[in-house]
Image (tube, helix red, strand yellow):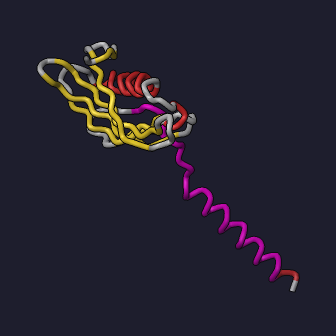
Amino acid sequence: MNYSIFYSSLILSIVLVSCSESSPVQEPEGLYEAEYGKDYFYAENGMDERVKVKSYARSDIVPNEEVGGVAMSSIIKCKFTAKNQSSYIPRQFSLFDNDGIATIQVKFLATNSYGAQGDEACYYKSDAEGNVSNRF
């Protein structure tokens, strides 16, 4: 009887150890890790929470290693255009060439001063070094 409990606990511990080793824990993806060919990245909303942002990035002007910085700068700048900054939720980041200028569009969801929620967009431009400025 004592041997059966011993062997059962031994087998159970071996099974549990082998299961924990075979399923590695994945680290969460970092913020603003945008790059060409990737269809999403994570950013912070107005409440400093991680949100998934759709990404449509295609530009011959901005190099791939600068796309993450451009995404971060434009999304943060866009946050300050919202009437209620704590309700700001970035939804889509687009980077494309338009008449020789790298144009950035950030679509976001936010509430106005009356509490009505709506979609809005910000437009910026970028150079090859990743500097972001107002488009218009």
Quadrant for the C terminus, please: top left
For residue 117, what is the image quadrant? top left
| 41 sits to left or right of 21 | left
Q: Measured from the top left, where is residue 107 in percent x and y?
A: 34, 36
Is residue 127 left or right of 87 when viewed as pictured? left
Between residues 135 and 44, which one lies in front from this camera angle?
A: 135
Q: Main secondary structure of the magenta part?
A: helix
Q: What residue is drawn where x is 26% and y is 14%?
A: 127
Which residue is at a point 60% across and 56% down the rendered structure image? 21
Please name the residue shown 45% across and 38% down the image: 110
User: Vertically, is 78 above or below 52?
Assistant: above
Q: Which residues are magenta?
A: 4-33
**29 in magenta:** yes
Residue furthest right as drawn: 2
Q: Residue furthest bottom?
A: 1
Spot the residue most to the left.
Answer: 99
Q: Depth check: give the residue in front, 60 or 14.
A: 60
The image shows residue 11, relative to residue 111, as above or below, that is: below
Q: Position of residue 102 (x, y in %)?
A: 22, 21
* Magenta stretch contains residue 45: no
Number of numbered tags placed on the structure image: 0
Give the residue drawn at x 56%, y 50%: 25
Taking the image as shown, residue 44 lies to the left or right of residue 128, namely right
Q: Position of residue 1 (x, y in %)?
A: 86, 86
On the image, which quarter does residue 100 sit in? top left
Comparing 100 with 69, the one in front is 100
Q: Is residue 13 above or below residue 8?
A: above
Q: Position of residue 9 (x, y in %)?
A: 77, 73
